[in-house]
Amino acid sequence: MLVRGADSFSRWLTSLRLDAKSNNPNNTAARVARLRLDRINAFLLVLSRMQAVPTADDPPVIKRIRQSSRYELWRLGHPHHSEVCVRLIVHFHASEAVVALVGGDKLRVSDQWYDTAVKQANAALDHYYRQREVS
């Protein structure tokens, strides 16, 4: 599938890449940024290799978000890690495209993170579909 990132996701990814560049082994922010990027890259690989919209039978790395409203949203997640808890929120459009909407680390905010992420994803999708109508 083709993976497209919303503007907010692209900004977050750029920020993580900049943070990860430090070679100082004592730089905690750089280490955490690299951990986040490792997980994001794995998620993007999973998405790019998908042949169809996911179902409930797919592996646990991707699950439907129960809190989603206007759009069907899915989240990609990884097994527990003590320093990061990265989630990537996606919406599948047709069978050939995936729109990566929101990414974040919910380590310190638990599942409440999804309430905000769903609102951001809905707004990003509204914008995405308006842009598609114009082009």
Image (cartoon, rainbow, N blue to C red):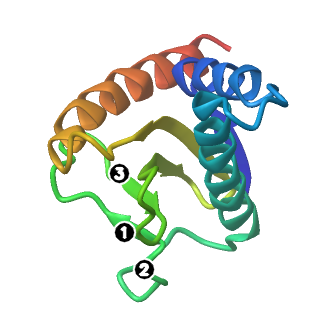
- Residue under label 1: 63
Name the residue at the top extreme: 134
Q: Badge 2: few (under 14), some or many (20 or more) residues near its Cα, within 10 Å?
A: few
Distance from the alpha carbon under mark 2 to that under mark 1: 6 Å
Residue at the spot x=26%, y=37% of the render? 118
| Nearer the camera: disc 1 or disc 3 | 1
**Residue 60 vs residue 98: left or right?**
left
Kind of residue at disc 2: Pro
Looking at the image, the residue that sits furthest to the front is: 26
Q: At numbered mark 2, what does the secondary structure look like: helix, strand or loop?
A: loop
| Mark 1 element type | strand
Residue plotted at (22% across, 30% down): 116
For the residues bearing labels 2 and 3, Cβ distance under 8 angstroms: no
The C terminus appears in which quarter of the rendering? top right
On residue 73, which mark appears? 3
Instruction: Mark 1 and mark 3 in contact? Answer it, CB < 8 Å.
Output: no
Q: Which callout, 1 or 3, points at the residue further toward the start of the chain?
A: 1
In the rendered structure, which amino acid carries the disc numbered 1?
A: Lys
Q: Are marks 2 and 1 in contact (CB under 8 Å)?
A: yes
> Which numbered marker is on residue 60?
2
Figure check: 24 above or below 112: above
Q: Residue visible at 20% across and 48% down?
A: 110
Q: Quick one: label 2 or label 3, which is nearer the N terminus?
A: 2
